[in-house]
Image (cartoon, rainbow, N blue to C red):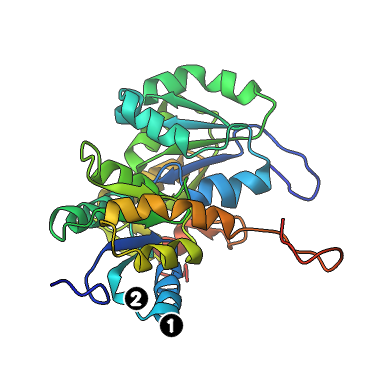
Amino acid sequence: MWSPAAGVRVPLDLCRIDDRLIHGQVVLGWGQQMRLGFIVLVDDEVAGSDWERELYRMGVPPEVDVVFETVDGAATRLGEFERDPRPGILLTGDVESMVRLVGKCSALRAVNLGGIHHKSGRVQRLRYVFLSPDEELALRSLESRGVAVTARDVPGARPVALSDLLSGKGE
Amino acid sequence: MNNPATELRAIIAAHGELAAGLVSAVDRITGRGSALGILSNVGLGAEQMEAMMRERIERDGVRAIFTDLPSGSWTMAARRAMRGNDQVVLVTGVNLAALLEFVMRDDLDPASGARSCVDRARAAIGVVTGGGGARAT
């Protein structure tokens, strides 16, 4: 894992679910502390839209590369991303996309819940995490396959384990 | 006749309570804080933010939007909500100097006012050291 103290890191340190995708917490909160080199934005809709891709690219400093991929495309290129020596963040905008990706890439061993906000059918679990019953099941299934699922919006926050989050011990 | 002190002319969309703080400061200085609406991102996801921004533009007729970070989620939401509408102007990186200029320029329509305050906002940022002359750099 990435260690700010030692400066030691493994590429794709952060695989994050955040419905805002690229925004301040990612670019500044995490990015500056990690000395971020690249972002892999995994979203089928964004990957297929020139306008959306440009919108997200404009929010990123020029020294940080942004790669836009579909879930299938990201799965194909994951090895390439992991060999990249620069610190990297992989983002999906929803639980379903991350679960699909992990299903295709057993190398992903940790998932960060960074921002899943209110929608009809979701229950609040943390200030920044709301989950539907289906999403809870999907995240539990990730853990049962050996993927560590924790919630943490910014680097300075305490990571909250999925079990604590779902049992109401998160805050 | 419109009253420049009470007419909503723009919205500020920012992280946490920043927008409320900026409007409070504008009101203290000019008495025209009511010209500025407030949006906070606290507890909101991308879809909610876009819907709120769209509502302000379409329902309230807002033509000038100020956001804090160019890479922030409010900027993303604003750009989506204003897409295809060239009557709306977005200014990112808002600061107090920009807003003071904006609210005092009620001779301009809101979109023109938003454009005009950018130079003032940039000029307000400087570095001052204890040595040397009195001029900021």
Compared with residue B7, is residue B78 higher up or lower down, i.e. above or below?
above
- Picture residue at 35% right of the left edge, 67% below the top: B103
Identify which residue, B3 or B14, lies in the foreground: B3
Q: Residue A131: percent from the left, percent from the top?
A: 31, 55
Earlier sequence position, callout 2 versus callout 1: 1
The amino acid on which the numbered mark 2 sits, given as a three-letter code, is Gly
Relative to B132, B64 lies left or right: left
Chain where mark 1 sits? B
User: Could you give the CA–CA distance between mark 2 and mark 1, rounded to whole angstroms?
Assistant: 8 Å
Identify which residue, A141 or A40, lies in the foreground: A40
Chain where mark 2 sits? B
Identify which residue, B53 or A153, lies in the foreground: B53
Relative to A44, A115 lies left or right: right
Q: Which residue is mark 1?
A: B28
Labels 2 and 1 touching (C-beta < 8 A): yes
Relative to A39, A98 lies left or right: left
Q: Residue A103: percent from the left, percent from the top?
A: 41, 29
- Picture residue at 31% right of the left edge, 22% below the top: A48
- Picture residue at 35% right of the left edge, 35% below the top: A97
Which quadrant: the N terminus of chain A?
top right
Label 2 environment density (alpha carbons within 10 Å; few <14, some 14–19, many ≥20)? many
Q: Which residue is mark 2?
A: B33
Q: Secondary structure at mark 2?
A: helix
Numbered mark located on residue B121 in the image:
none
- Picture residue at 58% right of the left edge, 49% below the top: A28
Q: Quadrant of residue B99?
A: bottom left
Q: Secondary structure at mark 1?
A: helix
Compared with residue B89, is residue B29 higher up or lower down, i.e. above or below?
below
The amino acid on which the numbered mark 1 sits, given as a three-letter code, is Arg
Identify which residue, B45 or A73, lies in the foreground: B45
Q: Residue A70: percent from the left, percent from the top?
A: 37, 24
